[in-house]
Amino acid sequence: MLSYFNTYGVRSSVFSFGFVTHKATQDMGAHIRWENHIPDKQHFLTIDKTIGWADPAQGGVPIVTHLHGAEVQSSSDGHPEAWFTPSGETGPTYLGQNYTYPNNQPPALLWYHDHTIGITRLNVVSGLAGMYIITSEQEKQLGLPLGLPLVLQDRQFYANGSINFPTLGIIPDEHPQWCPEYYGDTLLANGVVWPYLRVFPRPYRFRLLNGCSARFLVLSLSEPALSFYQIGTDGGFVSDGPWNLTTLTIAPAERIDVIVDFSLVGSGSKVVLNNSGATPFPTGDTDQAPPGTWAVMEFIVVDEDAYAELRMSVLAKSDVICKVPGWLLW
């Protein structure tokens, strides 16, 4: 299988960004070319140049992609100094942009993210990350419910909606802008602040990624009748599952595979996915866990027949169907 993903930046009429989910099949290799079309001459977030970083002589935003959890050759690992810029400048360990992922490992939820030396945290906060799911023919025969990826992250925003990243370092006398831990005051799911998802009264499979820079998440559901049935971790399916859990503790970069059965609550129910994780974990500081981090998103349980009629009615009146994420509309 040969795939070309223009994952970061702009190229001609194609625009793509983080939270693109790539799916692969076990033992079927994927050949991916990572490209950099970021037009900015310098990073829009402040770079602390007192610590080692890529520092391209010709300017531009350097990137390099690491597939987190993948078993690959070093040439496709996304070494921090294998970065490259849109102008063609490269880092000292750069070997090319065509990566091979054999996918000869158990079906699992992986994620890809930027790995550039010195600015990984800045590039990931800027959106350079997404999911990579390895499936298998055996998994498809298990009869598992519909799987939905959820990338959970925290951000700080200015009033105009742009990202706010601290510019005062924790050791300002030595590293003026170095902030190794970033705690946003707002939680996002798939890049959207506090979204909602309409679900039918049936089981759903959620592929969860904690994409926060430093925040641990402790997730729970507001409806007491519901719980999480965990069926997988970073490494694939759990051998002694499913585990019936009322809370999920997820560390940064950790992935968890769960099932939630919404048939246990009636149509019209509204279920909030909450977060009670102490920040910093595990002792906590109330200043680092403001109200904007207490709720992640909401699930609205709708009747399937009534919903189908409503949706067809709306579409019948529309001359143009906008291609926006269906989970925001429906």
Image (cartoon, helix red, strand yellow):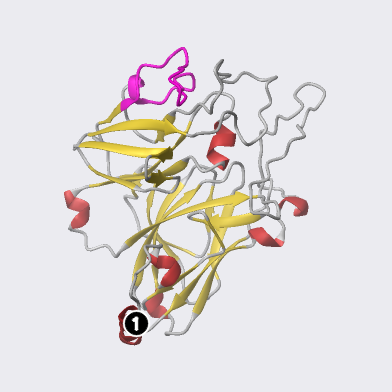
- The segment highlighted magenta reads 74-98
Measuring from the top left, give residue 57's x and y in whole percent. 56, 15
Residue nearer the viewer, 166 or 217 = 166
**Residue 8 to residue 190: above or below:** above
- Residue positioned 37% across, 40% down in the render: 12
Figure quadrant of residue 1: top left
Q: What residue is at 72 percent from the left and 39 percent from the top?
A: 166
Q: Amino acid at mark 1?
A: Lys
> Is residue 75 inside the magenta stretch?
yes
Q: Quadrant of residue 296?
A: bottom right
Q: Return the x and y of residue 231 as percentages of the image width and height.
A: 36, 56
On screen, residue 185 versus residue 300, left or right, reads: right
Q: Is residue 316 magenta?
A: no
Mark 1, residue position: 317
Quadrant position of the C terminus in the picture: bottom left
Residue at coordinates 71% horizontally, 55% vertically from top-left?
A: 159
